Image (spheres, rainbow, N blue to C red):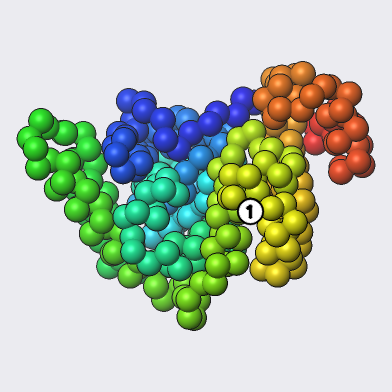
Amino acid sequence: MKTHQTGLNESQEAFFLRQSKISIISNTQLLEEASARIQLHAFTSLLCIQGEGTLSLNNCEVKLQPNDLFLCAAGNVLERKEVSDDFCCYGFYLSSHFLETIHNIPSYIWNLKAYASAHSVTRISEENARVYREYYNLIRSKLENQQDAANCQIVTNLLIQAFMYEFHDILASHIEMSPGKFTSGDYLFKQFVELLIESYPKPRMIGDYANKLHVTPKYLSMVCKQSCGEGASVLINRYVLNDVKNLLLCPDKSIKEIVNELGFPSVSYFGKYVKNNLGVSPRDYRKQLE
């Protein structure tokens, strides 16, 4: 089964506002594209409108019912499993850059991503679901009918910003805000994790990330240890392994194709990497999943 990359791509069903990095997800798009495995490259928010559906998030089943809000950070793999005939679900792709620029509460954005990692589905009230639906319809209408008028872009951006504040209020009772201000180490760790999630293929050396963050590898690893108890190399390896396992789940991808896609130097090197980390060869790992 092929894994598609999505999140910020134009299609007939995804209306992409380039300046703001926001994309609409329609029910049709979800049903058609997610029938294959989709690698998400943007923060994803979906609201189940009616019916029932089962999605697979990183090979774990997620069930959706009316008024369930599905949240998923970038870097995860989504697949539609089973849905009822009347299933309807729609929402938004939101890039990390967009989240940082459209909202002036960076600690909220950080907690939103952390919350999504721990709670992929949240049941919201009927009133909050109504607000979400109304903003979705308004924003979709604006993005579908972009005009040449000078103020059209401004109006659309303000509408999206208003939605983000409403979105904040919808989830405020579920997300615990971090007290106080972030330290410089907190911000560095946050930037590192976001860089790690969004990079594809992911570099496997600490130095590649440290260079982009303008710090030394030693300092970056120390900050990671202080923030989460694990060094940077451990976190990097975990995320790389997630990509490896997701691609090995796709039977139509050869080992050579996976090696090239993930930037490993050779098939033999990749085989040793998988053996050292998963205990079996890439082919044997695939056989275990059959």
x, y percentage for residue 229? Answer: 75, 67
Q: Report whether 289 appears left or right of 142.
A: right
Give the residue at the far bottom of this rendering: 179
The residue to which callout 1 is attached is 215
Q: Which quadrant holds residue 190?
A: bottom right
State the residue at coordinates (86%, 36%): 273
Amino acid type, mark 1: Val
Q: Is residue 290 above or below residue 190?
A: above
Q: Which quadrant holds residue 82?
A: top right
> Circle 1 sits in a helix, a strand or a loop, which is it?
loop
The quarter of the picture where the N terminus appears is: top right
Please state which of residues 188 and 272 is positioned toward the viewer in this rendering: 188
x, y percentage for residue 62? Answer: 57, 52
x, y percentage for residue 43? Answer: 46, 49
In the rendered image, is residue 60 in sight?
A: no
State the residue at coordinates (70%, 70%): 226
Please state which of residues 185 and 195 is positioned toward the viewer in this rendering: 185
Q: Is residue 175 above or below residue 275?
A: below
Please state which of residues 15 and 272 is positioned toward the viewer in this rendering: 272
Q: Report whether 68 appears left or right of 116.
A: left
Q: Report whether 106 appears left or right of 275.
A: left
The quarter of the picture where the C terminus appears is: top right
State the residue at coordinates (67%, 41%): 208
x, y percentage for residue 36? Answer: 56, 30
Give the residue at the far left of this rendering: 149
